[in-house]
Amino acid sequence: MPTLREVRIRRLLSQRELAKRANVVQRTIVEAEAGRQVPHPRTMRKLAEALDVDPMEVDEFRAAIEVAVEAAAEKVAA
């Protein structure tokens, strides 16, 4: 599964260009690629759309979505 950085580079985009296409601040991409911050689901969607991929195709996004789904399932089970 490719990382956000790998997908961005394959699309020949700089962090600045991706930020502009996704209408997010560049810092969001810097932090996500460095693994210091998990983007909000809405932001993941914006980035995925700007990269023309499904959010589940980006490693960091898939991991965050899986954690959120597990947490929701635990809440329901409790």
Image (spheres, rainbow, N blue to C red):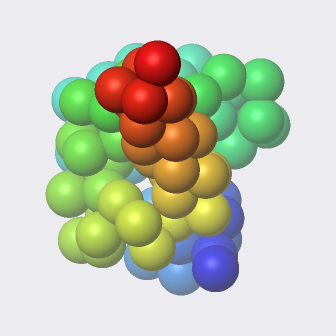
Front position in the image: 59 or 23:
59
* Image x and y of residue 21, in percent: 23, 45
* 22 on left or right of 70: left
- Residue at image point 42% right, 30% down: 77
**Percent coordinates x, y for residue 52 in the rendering:** 24, 71
Q: Residue 11: image x %, image y %?
A: 43, 76
Rendered image quadrant of residue 48: bottom left
* Quadrant hosting residue 49: bottom left
Given the current orientation, which residue lies at the most extreme front position?
Answer: 78
The answer to whether residue 33 is left or right of residue 18 is: right
User: Can residue 51 be seen from the camera position used here?
Assistant: yes
| Viewer-closest of 55 and 33 | 55
Q: Residue at x 51, y 65 (%)?
A: 58
Numbered marks: total: 0
Quadrant where the image shows the N terminus: bottom right
Question: Image point 46% across, 19% down: which residue?
Answer: 78
Q: In the image, is residue 62 above or below residue 77?
A: below
Q: Is residue 16 visible?
A: no
Q: Measuring from the top left, give residue 76's x and y in whole percent.
A: 35, 26
Q: Tell me if residue 75 comes above or below residue 10 in the rendering.
A: above
Q: Is 4 positioned to the left or the right of 16 in the image?
A: right
Query: Residue at (29%, 69%) from the top-left corner?
Result: 54
Residue 41, image quadrant: top left
Between 1 and 66, the residue placed more toward the observer is 66
For the residue pair 57 and 14, the one nearer the viewer reads as 57
